[in-house]
Image (cartoon, rainbow, N blue to C red):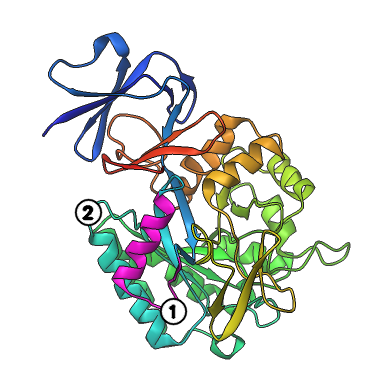
Amino acid sequence: MPTVVLTGARVFNGDHVLEGQAVVLEGDTLRAVVPTAEVPSGATVHALPGDTLLAPGFVDVQVNGAGGVLFNDTPTVEAALAIASAMRRSGTTGLLPTFITDDATRMREACEAALEATAHPHSGVLGIHLEGPFISRERAGVHATGFIRAPDPRDLDYLTALPRRFAAHGGRVLMTLAPECVDDATLRRLSASGVVLSAGHTAATSERTAQALQAGVRGFTHLFNAMPPVLNRQPGPVTAALLHDDAWCGVIADGVHVHADNLRLLLKVKPPGKVFLVTDAMPPVGTPVTSFTLQGRTILRRHGRLETEDGTLAGADIDLTASVRHCVQILGVPLEEALRMASLHPAAFLGLQGHRGRVAPGHRADLVLLKEDLSVHTTWVGGQLQRAE
């Protein structure tokens, strides 16, 4: 297996920015980080620009679409692969294609397609995110309320068998649900099977949310959005997320979905590592298109927003590199932590921290090379290079 060495750039290994180090790749695995003077003889050396930063590739657990493709429209292997390819150009080397509330047959089609895509070498598809259909009608957002339902025995038999099937290819199954719409016994069954549970599109009380966290819910989907605000006598799911140190919080950092001060408060209150970035990206990301159709509704791209004609937000018009820039430039997050929020922390949320999110021996050779302005120069997925320009 040929050895490839990346040298010349600074290296962010997941903890610190290192100078004078080279990264050694063998196939799809990162074998070592060594001083530049100790590059193995006989290796193929790629000299990177000296003003760049080599970092772990980004992991996005919530991508509805990109590059003109919407997973709900075409729940196929080709669609999942196309979405991953489109997002790769902006530094995302691993993602979960996200399928929002829809009918049961199409949901299963999406799962089977994502499973096949996950099995493709170097696809960047890490599993599937089912956002619904077991959510609150009150907090549905743009989800079609006609498809919202309670889980039935057939659902549970299918869903609880999925994690083992995905795990055969290193994949994960993430499900967003409303705690008030699913009982504790069902939460425990799903969690015990390996489904990663996240609370979202919910109107649950803080008490019910706390119970669900004890029953297997692991985190929160786009915290603050599609859930009630904090009120003096009705604190709701947001307060539960803030109070429970073990709970993970995904957030959309685009300057549209959540006020900057709410994100600063979240980062101040939560223990280090428990807040991660998601995009909630939709088909326009990576394209010049100005509108698309979501389950029969026209979604407009205007003023940095994706919204229905009446102004309801419908996903986000952002990629993870732009999210990192927003964290650094607007929120004042240190660069190292902003990069972890886009790589190590979401990987840990999915239980993939031993393989992704660090530039360290034994990890996947999934990398992003960033310019000084924090735009993407190059990505590698499984050791395979793809230029962004």
Determine whether 325 is above or below 123 in the image: above
Q: Earlier in the sequence, mark 2 or mark 1?
A: 1
- Give the percent coordinates (x, y) of residue 202: 66, 72
Task: Name the residue located 76 percent from the left edge and 44 percent from the top edge.
Answer: 265
The circle on residue 73 is 1
Whether residue 315 appears in magenta in the rendering, the answer is no
Task: Give the amino acid at mark 1.
Answer: Asp
- Residue furthest right in the image: 232
Task: Give the amino acid at mark 2.
Answer: Pro
In this view, the residue in front, 271 or 10, is 10
Task: Name the residue located 41 percent from the left edge and 36 percent from the top edge.
Answer: 56
Quarter of the image for residue 329 reads top right
Q: Quadrant of the C terminus?
A: top left
Task: Name the residue located 66 percent from the left edge and 35 percent from the top edge.
Answer: 333
Look at the image and give the residue range highlighted in magenta: 68-88
Quarter of the image for residue 165 reads bottom left
In this view, the residue in front, 250 or 254, is 254
In the rendered view, does 145 fall on the left or right side of 76? right
Crowding near pointer 2: few (<14 within 10 Å), some, many (20+)? few
Determine whether 340 is above or below 213 in the image: above
Determine whether 206 is above or below 170 in the image: below
Q: Which residue is mark 2?
A: 121
Work out whether residue 96 can be spotted. Answer: yes
